[in-house]
Image: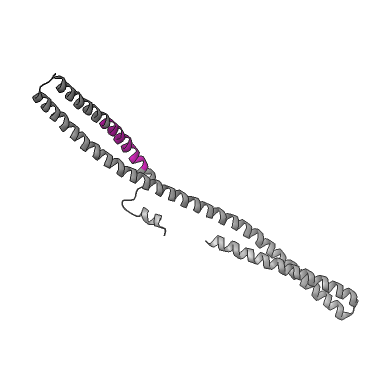
Amino acid sequence: MSHHEGAKEDAYYMDPKDVLSQYSVEWVSLRKSYDELKEQLNDVKAQLTELDAKLEKGEISEKDHIMEYREKWTMSTQMVQVKREVEARLYEIQKEIRAANRQLKQQEEEQFRRERMEQEKSNAMIEWMSLKQGFELVEKKRREITVQMDRLETQRRAGTITEDKYRTQRVDQIGQLAQLTIVESDVKRRLAELLEIIRK
């Protein structure tokens, strides 16, 4: 059993595609909130700068300046806290998405490997069946040559064939058997290789 198969039995297992789908919605929403908070913080910062300018120009009193400044500062502090929380959550989601992407890639690679292996097995089976038929034909040819050799030997003993003709045919038959032996050896080796692929 592979690690991935074990993961599927986990009560908390989620398909990486579901993880990506789930987090993409939250990511978009949080990212929008994050951008809005940044904009609001820039506005507060601009308002604080404006308050300082008003004080310098004498447009507001020191007391009003302190009160408004404190109010806006408190607001900006709360915004900064929320912004940090959003940033932390965005970071967590990034980690989850990257992990899900890695897992998804592993699954796709595993699926590709399995499909390639199945294709190899299928090809090996077709080649094995073809070679098996060829091997059977070689065996049949060997049996035919053996029968011819026995017949030739019988003719020699009976004296119905000349010694020269006997030797010529005998050499030819031995040559044919030698060629068949080489073919048989190659076919047997290839059949063994194919059988190993099929049994994987």
Q: Residue furthest left?
A: 63
Residue at horizontal 15%, vertical 22%? 56
Q: Quadrant of residue 126?
A: bottom right
Determine if residue 19 is in view. Answer: yes
Residue at horizontal 37%, vertical 45%? 98
Residue 179: where, in percent of width, then height?
75, 67
Q: Nearer the viewer, residue 139 or 28?
A: 28
Q: How is the image coloured?
A: one colour
| Most common SS among magenta residues | helix
Left or right: where 9 falls relative to 51: right
Residue at horizontal 31%, vertical 43%? 91
Relative to residue 142, is residue 98 depicted above or below? Answer: above
Q: Is 81 included in the stretch rendered in magenta?
A: no
Left or right: where 130 falls relative to 92: right
Left or right: where 31 falls relative to 106: left
Q: Nearer the viewer, residue 61 or 110?
A: 61
Residue 192: where, in percent of width, then height?
60, 65
Determine if residue 15 is in view. Answer: no
Residue at horizontal 56%, vertical 63%? 196
Relative to residue 94, is residue 33 depicted above or below? Answer: above
Relative to residue 3, is residue 94 depicted above or below? Answer: above
Q: Quadrant of residue 67?
A: top left
Which quarter of the image is occupied by the N terminus? bottom left
Residue 37: where, in percent of width, then height?
25, 32
Q: Nearer the viewer, residue 4 or 118?
A: 4
Relative to residue 158, is residue 82 depicted above or below? Answer: above
Residue 177: where, in percent of width, then height?
76, 70
Q: Which residues are magenta?
A: 20-37
Q: Is 26 included in the stretch rendered in magenta?
A: yes
Q: Quadrant of residue 5?
A: bottom left
Q: Residue furthest bottom?
A: 157
